Image (cartoon, helix red, strand yellow):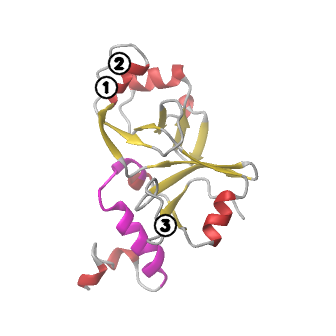
Amino acid sequence: MASLQGQFLIASPKLVDPNFARSVVLMVQHGEEGALGLVVNRPLETSVEEICEKVLETPCSTEGVLYQGGPCEGPLMVVHTHENRSDIEVKPGVHFSTERESIEWLLQYNEAPIKYFVGYSGWAAGQLETEMEGGSWLTVAATDEQIFRGEQELWSKLLAAATLGKWIDPERIPDDPSLN
């Protein structure tokens, strides 16, 4: 299977795992060793400022929502647009960082689109491919706007684009296709 890095995984309606039901996952890495992604449509009630002060033990004035990236525990993770602070280029112009120094810089100086995550979504070698063969996931190309905007209807819009988009221009699909 070709790498899904930089694409979205959209949970199919038949995926019942509560960790991923109605989720949209940005694929950060995908290869023979496995895959890592971040759920971009699960905002938490905790702010970036609150977690920054707890985890980094430093004052922080960054506003924004923290996202639940998935069920696996991990460090604070950031998706951003600063090439010079990148651990991985997810797709052209979109970068991923977990390094403390980079995150502290982004918290202090960033003015560009950014998303902060706790937890991540991980798959062992071959696991994601098996789930996709079973119909649990659909894929669509990720756009910068969809990655960073975080709208509530992202899952339903991308699901419609992934399924109905084969026959209809996705721009013409209403938010609720049953109203068509």
Please, what secondary structure does the residue beneath circle 3 have? loop
Q: Residue furthest right?
A: 32
- Judge from the rendering whether residue 168 lies leftward or rightward of residue 82; answer left or right: left
CB contact under 8 Å: marks 1 and 2:
yes
Q: CA distance from mark 1 to mark 2?
A: 6 Å
**Residue 141 location (% of width, % of height):** 52, 63
- Judge from the rendering whether residue 74 lies leftward or rightward of residue 1; answer left or right: left
Residue labelled with disc 2: 53
Quarter of the picture containing the C terminus is: bottom left
CB contact under 8 Å: marks 3 and 1:
no
Q: Which residues are magenta?
A: 147-166
Q: CA distance from mark 3 to mark 2?
A: 36 Å
Work out whether residue 111 or residue 104 is closer to the camera in this orientation and state it: 104
Q: Residue furthest left?
A: 179
Q: Which amino acid does the dot numbered 3 rest on?
A: Leu
Disc 3 crowd rating (10 Å Cα; few below 14, some 14-19, many 20+) is some
CB contact under 8 Å: marks 3 and 2:
no
Residue 15, labelled with which disc? 3
Vertical placement of residue 120 versus 86, above or below = below
Which of pointers 3 and 1 lies earlier in the amino acid sequence? 3
Work out whether residue 48 or residue 174 is closer to the camera in this orientation and state it: 48
